[in-house]
Amino acid sequence: MSENNIVMHIDMDSFYASVEIRDRPDLKEKPVAVCSKTYSLEKDAPRGVISAASYPARKFGLHSAMSLSEAMKLCPDVILLPMNRDLYKQVSDNIIKIIGKYMKTVQQVSIDEAYALFPDSVKTYDDAKRLAETVKNEIFAAERITCSVGIAPNKSTAKIASGFQKPNGMTVVLPENQLSFLSPLSITKIPGVGQKTNEFFDLYNIKTIGDLAKTDKRLLFEKLGKTGLFFSDIANGVDNAPVIETADVKSISRFYSLSPFTADSKALSLGCDAVCEEVHKLLTDKKMFYKTVTVSLRFYDFSTASKSKSHSVHVSDINILKRYAQEMLLELIDANAQHKKSRQISVGVSKLKKTDANQMQLSDFF
């Protein structure tokens, strides 16, 4: 079995709301909605649109893209929070780093979801499930939020599977079980089926994915064009779309989790060297040079401190990488002594430059 036959889709559970609740535990069991715009006029209800609703809020029927006026009618006690885009981006970037640490290829498709291909060492779906559990656990340990995962023979089925047991779910669909898994599900579970498309399906009494799989393709093409054929293929478990590495790599970084949390400078130094070696291996594999090195310490309370330093020219030397990283690590430790214990150290390189095809790197001589 080729590893390319196993695809993972990972979807963060109510991402914006989960990040907010993580940092405000008093909101854990309360209906919370994160809003793109939240403001109120005197005697008027708040105006704006929901971007994410917590699971307690969803029990009242609240969902993304719902107006705040409608949400407050359904749930007068809903707690409205403004968007904190910088925070969500920081958490998302860290999650993608975790996924990339274990996976061969990662295709991020939005701030809270990604597809991934398993490494060559993963030969079976049991292997894939075990590695996916490791990824899920590390995401939770690092960010204290959950995700749901779907593992399947292709991207479409994997995405449908990731939503099958939310929140904090794991659904594995074997190739031989793909049609039996898809068949009873609502047609609305297919990615891309919107209100207008669903109205057409209703007209022809196409209620489930299994109904669609048996529908005449000529009718689907006549009414929906190529989109109809695309939906038909998905219903029949056919999707040849590849998982493509997210384009335009602008930086490479890896992190080292410290367990238990520690303020021991020697332990932090060893972790720093280990991460530098991982980053350098990725640079070598991608045949890239770097110019800027960034070191970040994440403390026990999830606060973060970072420092960056740039070299005068693009280099690939691991010794320069380690020296810069260690120097900045000591500066971070000295400047943030009040935080004491750290939970994670990360090292990244940026201002990357692709190596010319004929240009030799130092590692070529060893």
Image (cartoon, rainbow, N blue to C red):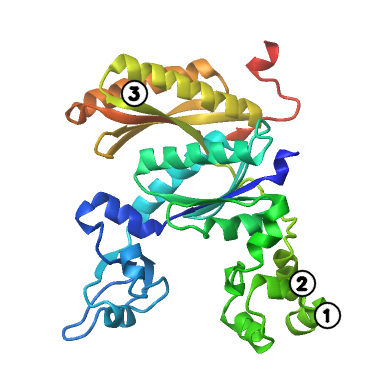
Front in this rendered view, residue 25 or 37: 25
Query: Where residue 29 sits: x, y (%)?
Result: 25, 60
**Residue 293 badge:** none
Of the image marks 1 and 3, the number of the one nearer the N terminus = 1
Residue type highlighted by circle 2: Leu
Secondary structure at badge 1 equals helix
Are dots 2 and 1 in contact, CB under 8 Å?
no
Please identify the quarter of the rendering in which residue 159 is found.
bottom right
Of all residues, the one furthest to the right in this rendering is 218
Is residue 340 toward the left or the right of residue 50 in the image?
Answer: left
Q: CA distance from mark 3 to mark 2?
A: 55 Å
Q: Which residue is mark 2?
A: 229
Give the answer, above or below, for where 345 lies relative to 164.
above
Looking at the image, can residue 97 be seen?
no
Q: CA distance from mark 2 to mark 1?
A: 9 Å
Q: Is residue 167 visible in this depiction of the protein?
A: yes
Residue at screen point 42% across, 56% down: 167
Check disc 3: other Cα within 10 Å, few if <14, some if 14-19, many if 20+.
Answer: many
Which of the numbered marks, if any, corresponds to residue 218?
Answer: 1
Q: CA distance from mark 1 to mark 3?
A: 64 Å
Point out which mark residue 329 bears.
Answer: 3
The residue furthest bottom is 203
Between residue 336 and residue 58, name the one nearer to us: 58
Quadrant of the image containing the N terminus: top right
